[in-house]
Image (cartoon, rainbow, N blue to C red):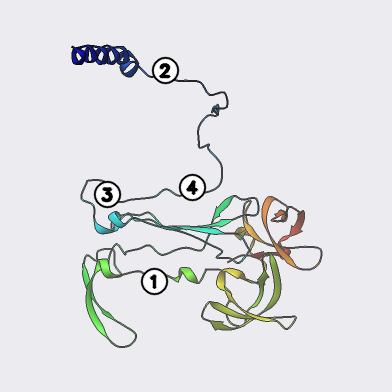
Amino acid sequence: MTRSRSSVLILILLLAALPLGCGPAVPTATADAPTFTGSGWFAEADAGLDFVHDAGPTDGAYFMPQIVGSGAALFDFDGDGRLDVLLLQNGGLDSHSKNKLYQQLPDGRWRSSTWRLPASIPRRIGSSKSATSLSGRVARRGGDTRTVGREDLRLMTPAAVPAKEATVGSAVWAQWTPNGWYHGKADKTCPVGLHVAYDDGDQADRPYALVAVDRAPRKGDVNVGTHLLAMWTDGRVYPGTVTQIADDKYDIQYDDGDTRTVGREDLRLLP
C-alpha cells in the first residue's frame, strides 16, 4: 500500500513538470544587447583595387592549380615605407587574365603599377601565331637539355626592366629614402637593378623601379593622371600626379599634399 501511494505521488509530479519542459522557450530581452543599424558589414569604397580573380574553368573538371588556389603578397616593392600588394591569377592555359601589382598611395588608396608581371604559363610555344607544339626541348645556360611540356614552362619577359629604364651611364634621380629622390649616375648593373653613385658621394644598389632617367619627357608622354617626378623650389624632384595641363604647363599634386605648376622641363618620368 505504501509503494502504490508513492508511485502515484511520483506520477503526479512528473505530469506537473511536463508543461515546463515541452513549452517553447521564451526569450528574455537584454537591456545591454547591441543592435546593428548599418547597411551591411561591407561598404563600397573607391580604393583603386580593381582586381578580379580568374579561377579558371568552372565546368567541374578542376585541375591541380585550381585546387591549390592563387595567392597574394603584401610587400614594399618601391621602398616608400607603405605596403604594396601583389595579386595573382590562376585561370589556366587559356586565360587572358594577368597578375597585378598595386602601389599604395599616401592617402591609403591603391594604383595599379606600370611594372608588368609575367603570366604564369605561356599559351603557346614558338614565335609565330600558328605555333601549336605542346612540348619543346629546352637548353639551360649550363648546357643541359630536357624535353618538357608547356605546363612546365614559364615566360621570362622584359617586365623587370621597364621601358623608360635607366642604363649604365645614365644621369638619374634615384630614391634614397621613401619619397627622397637624389641626383646621381648609374655606373653599373647589380643583382637588383642598377648601382647608383649619388652626387653627394653616397652609393646604393637600386631596383629599376626606383631609378628615373634625368631627362625631360616628350609632350605626348605626359597626360592628366600621370604619376611622375616634378621639380620643387629646392631644386630636387618629388613624386606627384599631373592634375591639369595648359599651354605646356603642368599642375602637380605632390604626394605629400603640396601643389605647384611647372614646365615640362621640370618633369621626369618614373619607370
Nearest to the eye among marks 3 and 1: give it.
3
Nearest to the eye among marks 2 and 1: give it.
2
Looking at the picture, which amino acid does disc 1 mark?
A: Met
Q: Which residue is mark 1?
A: 156
Nearest to the eye among marks 3 and 2: give it.
2
* Residue placed furthest toward the bottom: 143
Nearest to the eye among marks 4 and 1: give it.
4
Nearest to the eye among marks 2 and 4: give it.
2
Q: Quadrant of the C terminus?
A: bottom right
- The answer to whether the residue labelled 3 contacts the one labelled 1, judged by CB atoms less than 8 Å apart, is no
- The answer to whether the residue labelled 2 contacts the one labelled 1, judged by CB atoms less than 8 Å apart, is no
Mark 3 surroundings: few (<14), some (14-19) or many (≥20) residues within 10 A: some
Provide residue 57's location: percent of width, then percent of height.
27, 49
Please state which of residues 197 and 42 is positioned toward the viewer in this rendering.
42
Q: Quadrant of the N terminus?
A: top left
Q: Which residue is mark 4?
A: 50
Residue in view at x 54 percent, y 77 percent: 193
Mark 2 surroundings: few (<14), some (14-19) or many (≥20) residues within 10 A: few
Is tag 2's residue or tag 1's residue first in the polypeptide sequence?
Answer: 2
Please state which of residues 81 and 10 is positioned toward the viewer in this rendering.
10
Looking at the picture, which amino acid does disc 4 mark?
A: Asp
- The answer to whether the residue labelled 4 contacts the one labelled 1, judged by CB atoms less than 8 Å apart, is no
Please state which of residues 174 and 86 is positioned toward the viewer in this rendering.
86
Q: Which residue is mark 2?
A: 26
C-alpha span from label 2 to label 1: 67 Å
Looking at the picture, which amino acid does disc 3 mark?
A: Pro
- The answer to whether the residue labelled 3 contacts the one labelled 2, judged by CB atoms less than 8 Å apart, is no
Residue 66 vertical position relative to residue 15 in the rendered view, above or below: below
Residue 198 vertical position relative to residue 128 in the rendered view, above or below: below
Residue 57 shows which numbered tag? 3
Is tag 3's residue or tag 1's residue first in the polypeptide sequence?
Answer: 3
Label 3 element class:
loop
